[in-house]
Amino acid sequence: MGQVLGYTVLLLRAYARDRTALFFGFFFPLLFMVLFGVLNFGGSVRVNLGVVDEAKNDQSASFIATLSKIETFKLTSGERDAEVAKLTAGDRDLVLVIPGDFRIAPAGSGTSVPTLALYRNSARAEAGAVGTAILNSLIDQLSFAVTQTAPVVSLKSQEVTGRNLKYVDFLTPGILGMTIMQLGISSVAFAFVAERSRGVIRRIMATPIPRRNYIAAHVLQRLILAVVQVLILLGVAVLAFNVTVVGGLGSLLLVAVLGAVVFLNLGFAVTGLLTTENQAAVATQIVTLPQLFLSGVFFSRDAVPAFLKPVADFLPLTFLNDALRAIATTGASLGDVGGQILGLAVWAVVSFFLAYRLFRLD
Amino acid sequence: MPSIVSVTELRKSYGQIKAVDGVSFDVAEREIFGLLGPNGAGKTTTVEILEGLREADGGTAVVAGVDVRRDPSGVKERIGVQLQQSAFPENFLAREIVDLFALFYRKRVDAMAILRSVGLEDKARQKQEKLSGGQRQRLSIAVALVNEPRVLFLDEPTTGLDPQARRNLWELVRAIRARGTTVFLTTHYLDEAEALCDRVAIMDGGRIVALDSPPSLIEALLKRGFRKELVQQQANLDDVFLDVTGHALREE
């Protein structure tokens, strides 16, 4: 164990001197954040929300008033048919229908909770996703307020007003997922292919260090790097880009480490198939590029074409991004993202098996 | 003198090719032993078997009291190696490379003292990949010494070095032997073998075709009636080169 830890420390020190690695590990993701976040695709996203009030009571009026205070929403109201038609025409991103039985109160026994119907414009997936997230959290907070104590809607609504999901808020967890993927796949593939072809590994294997210790140190180094990357990127996101992270840091790190395990396994598996650095360049692109676009790094996954959805839904980066995003933007607990964690765990097992079968040191 | 490397009928084939075809020899303790031969003679395969890096198909090899085929990692503990076409990981400082390899042997060492012993103490804080060819070879030998090996294996240690750096390395090898370490080296350069080795084995086609001290081998050749046109020359081009450029080590 001392050998593994000592080796890990030396690897981390060497990493700190490696300009290329630092660029791709830290500067590059930050650059993305700047490009997409500051130059931004439209500052904060504006969501055109059509509201159809079929209840027309005090409570629906107060609910609409709360909605109107949320900066992100550009509110319009009208009849259901007219609003849905405008949605189809692209003039609305979302149409929310408040049902006739709407009230803000705990459901009595035998009665059901009123259901708000939401129409989303699939062509404007981005805004739709942001708007839905805000609506969900608003409803959650209303429900919480109602069931916990006496209704204090006005107070809660002010808190909601302060929460304005910006595009960088949405983007940051995606950048974290992307960085973890790159760390696992590219850093492993390039490092090991180069060290193998230059004879570094051969030289090390001429010493008595057991192979498992050698690999363990490389894995541990990268898991530590994953944690450091998440902390630094989140720190910059919060301090420099004013990103709001709602969920717990511990949960984010736990999911990030699980994701890193999956991608490291995949990295080792892919590396087993490669001999030259040119092959590594191609192979890492083949593995990472589709996930970059299908797994919701920069944009909502709703934008993924329908025929690719069955694939996109099960990519490891999809599970990772969805979990990170749910925790960061809606404050989801580990239990809330249990499905994604299960998905990552299955990938971890499968990819470990692949790495075990494919990876070779010589 | 007791032998520290003892090889009997060693064999290794790659498919149809018999890379090592019944090789036997002994290396005495504190000897500088040279294994010579053209490319493809089986030198590197033989050495890699002795280093525990490759499995033999037949025969026995005992290095520093350890049967290589039974306990390859036990051999690795007891020997120092410098491999051909190998490199150290990048972005490590020279002294970190020493620390790193000490860690691989689970030894605590004074990295600076080891670097000093190969004349690299002022390069300790330099990245290893920034060192010159000769400096890197000396670092490589320093690293091979971290576990205080009983036998040091050097595979073509002076390939690619300028005459000054070569002679500097020869001095280092002699100093290491003077401290009590046996040196086993392979080389393409016959002048190097003649200058450095107590005994040499010449390999060809997977077999040892000659084995003795350089003067004895030359004498035996002359006794067989070999004659070369006698040219009385008190110096050669090597001497000229060193005379005009000096013996001082160059920093590339």
Image (cartoon, grey):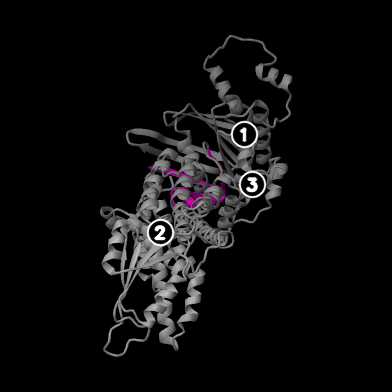
Give the numbered dot on residue B93.
3
Indicate the amino acid at tag 3: Leu
Indicate the amino acid at tag 1: Gly
Q: Report if residue A320 is visible in the image.
A: no
- Quadrant of the rendered image containing residue A239: bottom right
> Was residue B61 drawn as part of the magenta stretch in this picture?
yes
Q: Mark 2 falls within which chain? A: A
- Quadrant of the rendered image containing residue A276: top left
Indicate the amino acid at tag 2: Val
Q: How many marks?
A: 3
Q: Report if residue A213 is visible in the image.
A: yes
Image marks 1 and 2: residues in contact by CB distance under 8 Å: no
A273 left or right, relative to B76: left
Along the line of sight, the residue nearer the viewer: A33 or A57: A57
> Was residue A59 drawn as part of the magenta stretch in this picture?
no
- Mark 3 closeness class: few <14, some 14–19, many ≥20 residues within 10 Å: many
Residue underneath mark 2:
A262
Q: Position of residue A96 (x, y in %)?
A: 33, 70
Along the line of sight, the residue nearer the viewer: A239 or B1: A239
Q: Seen from this angle, which residue lies furthest bottom?
A: A109
Q: Position of residue A230 (x, y in %)?
A: 52, 60
Q: Where are the magenta residues, as a range?
A: B57-83
Q: Secondary structure at mark 2?
A: helix
Q: Secondary structure at mark 3?
A: loop
Give the numbered dot on residue B133.
1
Q: Position of residue A23 (x, y in %)?
A: 55, 48
Along the line of sight, the residue nearer the viewer: A143 or A204: A143
The Cα–Cα distance between marks 1 and 2, rounded to whole angstroms, is: 40 Å
* Disc nearest the viewer among 2 and 3: 2
From this view, report whether residue A94 is shown above or below residue A306.
below
Give the numbered dot on residue A242.
none
The Cα–Cα distance between marks 1 and 3, rounded to whole angstroms, is: 16 Å
